Amino acid sequence: MSGEKARLGHETEKQRWDRNFADLLQELRVVQTGIQILFAFLLTLPFSSGFPRVTQFQKDTYVVALLAAAASTAMIIGPVAFHRALFRQGRKPELVRYAHRLLSGGLAFLLVSMVSCVLLVLDFILTRWIAFVFAGIAAVFFLTFWAAFPFFRRNWIDEDAEEEDEQVSGEDVTPGETAGRAV
């Protein structure tokens, strides 16, 4: 952790906001493509030949998936419009905070849409109770990787990564030690 702090300690406030903005843009690029593909698929689904055979429950699940995907798309693309409005006004901190909130909300709606899609497809091809079980497993799976792991690792750094950070930042690290601790 001290290596990370040392590396970031030499960063100016402007550099930190620029780095945060660059990181956020990269995250947006990754998730934007996925949600746009999912949303496009959901928009075409009612026009497929098998759609008239779905039950009312499946139609309701489809509506939840579609509306959640639409909300996710709006929230994930929202920072682009916000950036256009604030362009060259020196308000990057505000933009980063706003974009972070929108991306977090967009991921929450994406979770709802993905789990609804799993439920919809599995309810169409399997029995309803099995569809609920697997949709629940999918929800737990997504929540584990999107929320639980990041939450529990937020203050945890691997010792090997810490040693690399310290070496990159120019601190002397003797073999077998990291940040003053014996390995």
Image (cartoon, helix red, strand yellow):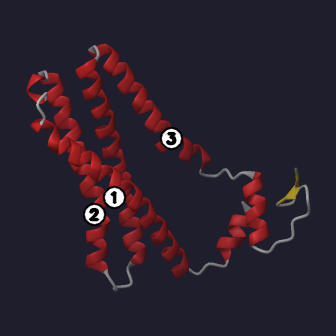
Circle number at residue 78: 2
- Give me the C-alpha separation between circle 1 and circle 2: 7 Å
Q: Which of marks 3 and 1 precedes in the sequence?
A: 1
Residue 48 image point, x, y percent: 13, 35
Which amino acid, by three-letter code, is at mark 2?
A: Gly
Q: Which of marks 2 and 1 precedes in the sequence?
A: 2
Residue 93 image point, x, y percent: 43, 74
Which amino acid, by three-letter code, is at mark 3?
A: Phe
Residue drawn 58% across the image and 81% down it = 12
Q: Secondary structure at mark 1?
A: helix
- Residue 162, by quadrant, is bottom right
- Give me the C-alpha separation between circle 2 and circle 3: 24 Å
Answer whether labels 2 and 3 touch (C-beta < 8 Å).
no
Residue 143 image point, x, y percent: 45, 37
Which amino acid, by three-letter code, is at mark 1?
A: Leu
Residue indicated by mark 3:
145
Marker count (numbered) = 3
Q: Is residue 46 visible?
A: yes
Residue drawn 43% across the image and 26% down it = 137
Q: Is residue 78 left or right of residue 152?
A: left
